[in-house]
Image (cartoon, grey):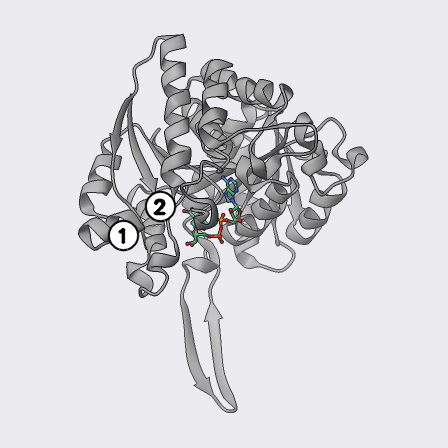
Amino acid sequence: MKIAVIPGDGIGPEVVKQAIVVLEAVAQKFGHRFEFQEVLMGGAALDAVGVPLPDETLKVCLKSDAVLLGAVGGPKWDDLSGHLRPEAGLLGIRKGLNLFANLRPAKVFPQLKSASTLKEEVLGEGLDILVVRELTGDVYFGDKGRAEIPGGQKAWDTAVYSTHEVERVAHVAFKIARGRRRKVTSVDKANVLESSRLWREVVSRVGQQYPDVELNHMYVDNAAMQLIRNPSQFDVILTTNMFGDILSDEAAMLTGSLGMLPSASLGEGKLGLYEPVHGSAPDIAGQDKANPIATIMSAAMMLRYSFGLEQEAQAVEDAVSRVLEQGYRTADIATPGTIVVGTREMGHLIAQNL
Ligand code: NAD
């Protein structure tokens, strides 16, 4: 399997390197062959060729089976204008690969329960939620503008969804739910928004094709509340671009640590983009301090969603769990009595524990 690798900037190269160490251990243990091809994006690409997303990068990614990305950006490139900022590469690659479903798991490892902002009794047996956010429609991409009116200006952003856009992301959510606890909660604002009413109709219709998956609908204001009150009621949360933007951060933060959060973005085929939720953390770059687990867990998602290697994905997640159980922590998740290790050692421990 061909994997395009975009190390990016800051801690990106450090955490990506450890994900590759773990993927190579998976290949050896399970008898696979992964071919890695490194390409440039973000600040690294700006320095080398003057654009944040070189054509060559997109070409290599499109020819690959999956893309593994570290993070991009940093103070060095902060003063550049919009289309030349490293982050422009992120939007460009998502668009170029036609990725429309963003998957953000929020999982609390029992060993890290104390890092959560929630009380133990609310967390119960732990937390394992997957937010599926639509990525290409809604108020972010609809008609927007400004006009002069008496006394000032008016401005608008239009929330737009088509049947097709809702259908394709709903199928992603229902299919994934089948490999989990078979429950989809679709989140919208159908009591107020017409685009949400279409969303709800289409999701209900798609849901009929998955009679083995339980579907319920929830208004976004209630969902925001329920995530804090009783998060274990959720399995897969399916939602629109803007509500997903907000709820996925809320759900993620219930786990308490940025260095632990993976993500995946999927399109029609098997090609997906896998990256940690965190940024390039310039404050700790090059110091062997970054937590590589978010990137390693992103690689596990790659095994599961792009390669269909469920057993291998599970093996990586179990290895992470085992290393935490043994008391090893990077500095960001360390608590008294645990053993603090660096980026490299954490990656090697996880590979060893496969
Ligand atoms: P950040 O996520 O990089 O860092 C926030 C804080 O969390 C920092 O204190 C950092 O040290 C810590 N942190 C982040 N990841 C960590 C890890 N794996 N292990 C240990 N600690 C970790 O967010 P920021 O500081 O707001 O942004 C820094 C740069 O990253 C900016 O240029 C921003 O634009 C960019 N960024 C990129 C992405 C991406 O590539 N997807 C996402 C967010 C931010």
Q: Earlier in the sequence, mark 1 or mark 2?
A: 2
Name the spot of residue 326 as percent of width and height, x first: 62, 19
For label 2, the crowd category at 10 Å Cα-Cα, with few meaning under 14, some 14 to 19 and many 20 or more, is many
Q: Quadrant of residue 10?
A: top left
Q: Nearer the viewer, residue 246 or 159?
A: 246
Name the spot of residue 146 as percent of width and height, x first: 42, 77
**Any part of residue 105 in sight:** no
Residue at the (52%, 91%) spot, across then down? 151
Determine whether the beta carbon of the residue marked 1 sits less than 8 angstroms from the nearest atom of ligand 1: no
Report which residue position mark 2 lands on: 9
**Any part of residue 332 in sight:** yes
On the picture, is 70 further left or further right than 352? left
Name the spot of residue 299 as percent of width and height, x first: 42, 27
The residue positioned farthest toward the right in the image shown: 121
Disc ID at residue 52: 1
Indicate which label's residue lies in the foreground, 1 or 2.
2
Residue at the (60%, 42%) spot, across then down? 252
| Position of the N terminus by quadrant | top left
Q: Nearer the viewer, residue 182 or 337?
A: 337
Under mark 2, the amino acid is Asp
SS label for mark 2: loop
SS label for mark 1: loop
Under mark 1, the amino acid is Pro
Name the spot of residue 175 as percent of width and height, x first: 50, 27
Residue at the (27%, 52%) spot, across then down? 52
For label 1, the crowd category at 10 Å Cα-Cα, with few meaning under 14, some 14 to 19 and many 20 or more, is many
On the picture, is 295 further left or further right than 341? left
Determine whether the beta carbon of the residue marked 2 sits less than 8 angstroms from the nearest atom of ligand 1: yes
The residue positioned farthest toward the bottom in the image shown: 150
Q: Nearer the viewer, residue 297 or 208?
A: 297
Tell me the distance, in whole angstroms, between the alpha carbons under discs 1 and 2.
Answer: 11 Å
Q: Nearer the viewer, residue 160 or 267?
A: 267
